[in-house]
Every structure is written in structure tokens, then in C-alpha cells.
Amino acid sequence: MKNPPRQSAPGAQPQGTTDEASASRYVRRLFSDIAPRYDLLNHLLSFQVDRYWRSVTTRQFRHLLSNPAARVLDLCCGTADLSLALARRGSAQVIASDFSHPMLTIARHKLNKLQRDGPPPLLAEADALQLPFSDDSFDLVTCAFGFRNLVNYGAGLQEIWRVLRTGGEVAILEFAEPTGPLMAPLYSFYLHRVLPAIGERVSGVRGSYSYLPGSVDRFPSKEEFSEQMRAIGFSGSGRRELTWGIAVLYTGKKTAR
Ligand SMILES: C[S@@+](CC[C@H](N)C(=O)[O-])C[C@H]1O[C@@H](n2cnc3c(N)ncnc32)[C@H](O)[C@@H]1O
């Protein structure tokens, strides 16, 4: 099956939306609707590999997470699986943030059960494009599978840059499409045919999981996204492909411009 042509886009634009405001409302409603079944579907549709991807991410930032004075912002935290993994990895202060209230309600239940040495993670209901945090206030900003849902990728990177202190680091984990001759068609079939069908059936929300393949298709290529990060000013930008390139961990550091 042939993929629709990949295009560079300023941000997510679900079908039927006309501008950033309507796209943002759509995305927030969609995730709020699927929140009750989100964890189940996440683990089911990724065959539990999502746990490995989060673990790779937290392992890479052990040096920051083990510092009790460090402040970590987990953007688009959803039900807080990455926030939990970050908190378990050390004693840094973790702040989990998302703009979907139902997602945060589930996140709060999970975070309340956490026992750790450091301070309990905090929750913030906020739009990643307009964060209620001051400039230069975090040592690490993470975002797992949330970034491609932002309605303006450039603005999202700028906002991460703003809240990071100089020397602070960013980690964005996102889906990509593998390019290998065997995996590319197999994954494309899975992403465009199998996943929407299972997602819709299990979530009970019509059309919910048809948005996902479109959002992956629309996201810039690995090379383009790395270039966007560099253009914002992130230095030492790294890109680690995981599981045949189905997921990519993009990293970078805020250095003085
Ligand atoms: C695919 S889920 C990822 C959740 C979690 N990080 C994980 O790894 O499972 C995407 C999340 O991004 C959130 N999101 C999308 N756009 C957002 C925005 N502009 N501001 C804050 N959260 C946003 C959604 O509400 C949703 O919870």
C-alpha cells in the first residue's frame, strides 16, 4: 500500500479543521474521549514496546534525573506513563503537563500511588504552546508521542526553548515510518489499516484512531525535524531510531544563541 505523500506541515491539522484553534479543540476532545481506554490501547497496539521506548528515554537522562535539585517537565503527559518512569529513575522534581482534563485525572490516580525518595510529581493542566511557566525554569523537557499533535511544531519547539534553562536538555519521542524494504510496507499496512480498526473498536470512539496514521504521515521526516530543532538553536541534536525506526528519540541542548 502506498503512503500519501509526506509534506512538511506547520502542525497537526485533523480532517475538517480549518485553523489552529479548531485543530487544537479537535485534538483535545479526541484525547479526552479516548482517555479511559488509552493505556490499554497503548500497550496493546504497541505490543508493550512503548514501555521499552520510555525506558530508553529515561535511561539517557539519568544524570539529570538523579539530581534532587533538577526540574523536569513532561509535556503532553497523557496518563503519565513517561512522568512515572522519569520519577522512578531518580529524585528530580517532575511536573506532568497536558491540556486534556480526563487524561490528567487518570494521571493523578497513577501518580498518587507512586512511592519515591524525591518530591511527588506535580500536575499542570496547560497547553504546550502556552505554558504557565517562567523562562529558564527547567533542566529537562520531555514529550512522548505528544509533539506531533501540536498544531504548530515551530511554536512548540520555541516554547520548550523558552522554559528550558541554558544548558537544559530536551527529549522528544515520536513515531516515524520505518524505511527498510520489509518493515516499511508491513508497518504502513499496520498503521493505516489494522491500528485504526482495533483502536476504534476497543476505544468505542468512532474515527478516533484514524487520526493517528494521518498525524504520523503529516509529521516532518526525521531529517527535517532534526533540522527544525537545530534551527531553533538546540545544539548537539541527537536522533536515535528505535525498533526499526518506528519510534525516534530526538534530543538536544539549549545553549546560548
Ligand atoms: C498520544 S498521547 C501521549 C501521552 C503520553 N505522553 C504517552 O507517552 O503515552 C498525546 C497527548 O498529548 C496531549 N496534547 C496534545 N496537544 C497538546 C497541547 N497543545 N498541549 C498539551 N497537551 C497536548 C493530548 O491531550 C494527549 O494526552
Image (cartoon, rainbow, N blue to C red):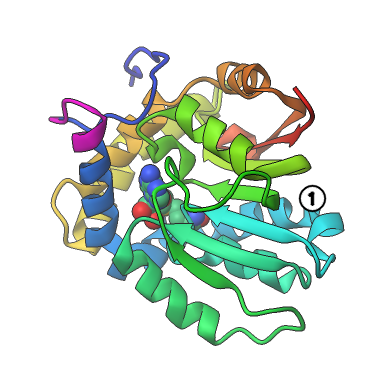
**Residue topped by disc 1:** 60
Please determine whether, in this image, residue 73 is positioned above or below residue 211: below
Residue visible at 79% across and 50% down in the picture: 60
Is residue 226 at least partly visible in the picture?
yes
Residue 211 lies left or right of residue 110; in this view the side is left
Q: Find residue 39 and report its image quarter.
A: bottom left
Label 1 CB, ligand 1: below 8 Å? no
Residue 224: image location, x then y, percent: 57, 16
Q: Report the label total.
A: 1
Magenta segment: does it hold 17?
A: yes
Please determine whether, in this image, residue 256 is positioned above or below residue 59: above
Residue bounds of the magenta highlight:
16-22
Please determine whether, in this image, residue 76 is positioned above or below residue 248: below
Look at the image and tell me in which quarter the C terminus lies. Answer: top right
Residue 23: image location, x then y, percent: 24, 35
Look at the image and tell me in which quarter the N terminus lies. Answer: top left
Residue visible at 38% across and 39% down in the picture: 149
